[in-house]
Image (tube, rainbow, N blue to C red):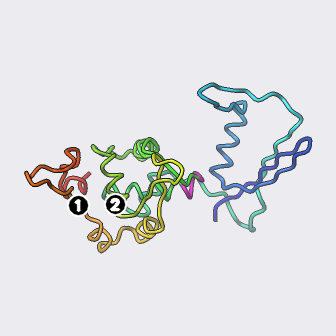
Amino acid sequence: MEQKYTVELVGPGLSLKKELPEPVAHELLVWLLKGGRLQAQGAAITPQPTQAEVKVSAAPQPAGHTASAVVSVREFMEQYSPARVPDKIACFGLYLREHRNQREFAKEDLVGLFQDAADPLPKNLTRDIRWTQQIAWVAPSATNPEMYYLTKKGEDAVRAKFAKELVQKTRFSAPARRRNGAPDDKSDTATESSPDAT
């Protein structure tokens, strides 16, 4: 069971109490210890002192319960054994949602996660994101086409640990070729074996 923390913000005309998962509570604590600096339009802003008081405390836990350690992205991947790049992208999407309270992600987030996991960065991540989208494991955000979210189908694939039949159904499809034999998109000339091996 994941350790839960209660965050309480109290001030003039304000009283907010919210329960957070341990990783989010730790990030908030680090932010507060650094002075609570906010980023707005590329410039750092330091909030003016107020009478508000923030309290962070651990929620009551069952007897004998010990706080769980923060799960790294590498540890999370080892639970599900993703092999292909789309498998890893779906795995990253579930990790972000469950351990960083982040439901949407951009290409830059994936690059950072590959680095955090000490996993080689794919040679054509843009193509691989499109591949993951074509098999309906991720979908673009309704408010920002540069952001993606993990679909129910993608989550099911992760939970099933990328069963052999799922892998067979989601093999890489080369782009349609023109009459002269050239591919429609020259950037997508990779074969099935190339993305799978990445």
Camera-side residue of 105 and 83: 105
- The mark found on residue 134 in the picture is 2
Q: CB atoms at circles 2 and 1 under 8 Å apart?
A: yes
Camera-side residue of 181 and 165: 181
Residue 55 in view (yes/no): yes
| Residue 139 in picture, x, y percent from top left | 44, 58
| Residue 150 in picture, x, y percent from top left | 47, 59
- The mark found on residue 173 in the picture is 1
Q: State the residue at coordinates (16%, 50%).
A: 183
Residue 46 vertical position relative to residue 32 in the rendered view, above or below: above
Q: Which stretch is magenta?
A: 97-101
Structural crowding at the residue carrying mark 2, measured as other residues with C-alpha within 10 Å and reported as few (<14), some (14–19) or many (≥20) = some
Q: State the residue at coordinates (23%, 60%).
A: 173
Q: State the residue at coordinates (59%, 27%).
A: 42
Camera-side residue of 151 and 158: 151
Q: Is residue 98 magenta?
A: yes
Tell me which corner region of the image, top left, top right, bottom left or bottom right, holds residue 6: bottom right
| Residue 198 in picture, x, y percent from top left | 26, 51
